[in-house]
């Protein structure tokens, strides 16, 4: 993914990153152990300011096995849930539909300025509360769209 259209940028969201259940497959993500957290990264160029981060769960995630939880957080190297704190996205949970700016990094209305290149880190964790192991490559449905407001300074 990447930059949004000029029309979408006018609404305040300059970048987007779409993740579907297919991104968790062995072919896409390599071998995933049971209870493994999977990390996706979105590049932030040096001289950028991240002002807003949001997620829209288009389709709840489901799996072919006994999985009953899938949670995500969004942050960076300094604070792994600094943009979005824990959100639930599995069909067996009370999943979110929309979430924005729940992390501590965006408590400051000015956002976060990056003087060096970095990444926005999106971490998905199965079975966070129940401890019932399943592999993320068992997912058979799910789509989530992450939106970012990133200004170049």
Image: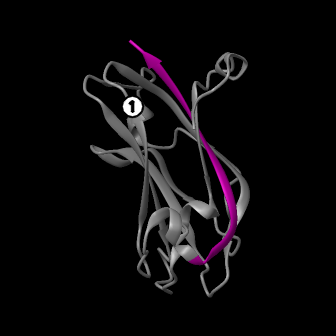
Residue 111 appears left or right of 78: right
Residue at x 40% of width, y 22% of height: 49
Residue at x 67% of width, y 22% of height: 5
Residue 33 falls in which quadrant of the image?
bottom left
The mark tally for this picture is 1
In this view, 51 is above or below 127: above
Tell which of 43 and 100 is nearer to you: 43
Image quarter hosting the N terminus? top right
Residue that carries the numbered disc 1 in the rendered image: 44
Residue 146 falls in which quadrant of the image?
top right
Residue 140 falls in which quadrant of the image?
bottom right
Tell which of 152 and 31 is nearer to you: 31
Residue at x 51% of width, y 62% of height: 28
Residue at x 63% of width, y 26% of height: 4
Is residue 88 visible in this depiction of the protein? no
Of helix, strand and loop, which mostly describes the magenta segment? strand
Image quarter hosting the C terminus? top left
Residue 10 in picture, x, y percent from top left:
67, 15
Residue 147 in picture, x, y percent from top left:
59, 36
Residue 129 in picture, x, y percent from top left:
48, 77
Q: Is residue 139 magenta?
A: yes
Tell which of 10 and 108 is nearer to you: 10
Q: Is residue 76 magenta?
A: no
Is residue 7 visible in this depiction of the protein? yes
Q: Residue furthest front?
A: 27
Q: What range is drawn magenta here?
A: 138-153
Label 1 packing within 10 angstroms: few (<14), some (14-19), many (20+): some
């Amino acid at each position: 993914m990447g930059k949004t259209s000029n029309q979408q940028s006018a609404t305040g969201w300059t970048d987007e990153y779409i993740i579907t259940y297919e991104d968790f497959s062995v072919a896409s993500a390599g071998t995933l152990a049971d209870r493994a957290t999977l990390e996706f990264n979105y590049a932030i160029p040096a001289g950028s300011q991240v002002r807003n981060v949001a997620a829209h769960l288009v389709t709840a995630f489901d799996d072919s096995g006994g999985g009953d939880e899938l949670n995500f957080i969004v942050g960076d190297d300094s604070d792994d849930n600094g943009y979005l704190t824990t959100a639930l996205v599995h069909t067996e949970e009370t999943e979110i539909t929309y979430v924005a700016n729940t992390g501590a990094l965006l408590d400051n209305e000015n956002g976060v300025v990056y003087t060096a290149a970095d990444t926005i880190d999106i971490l998905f964790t199965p079975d966070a509360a129940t401890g019932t192991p399943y592999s993320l490559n068992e997912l058979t449905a799910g789509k989530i769209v992450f939106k970012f407001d990133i200004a170049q300074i």
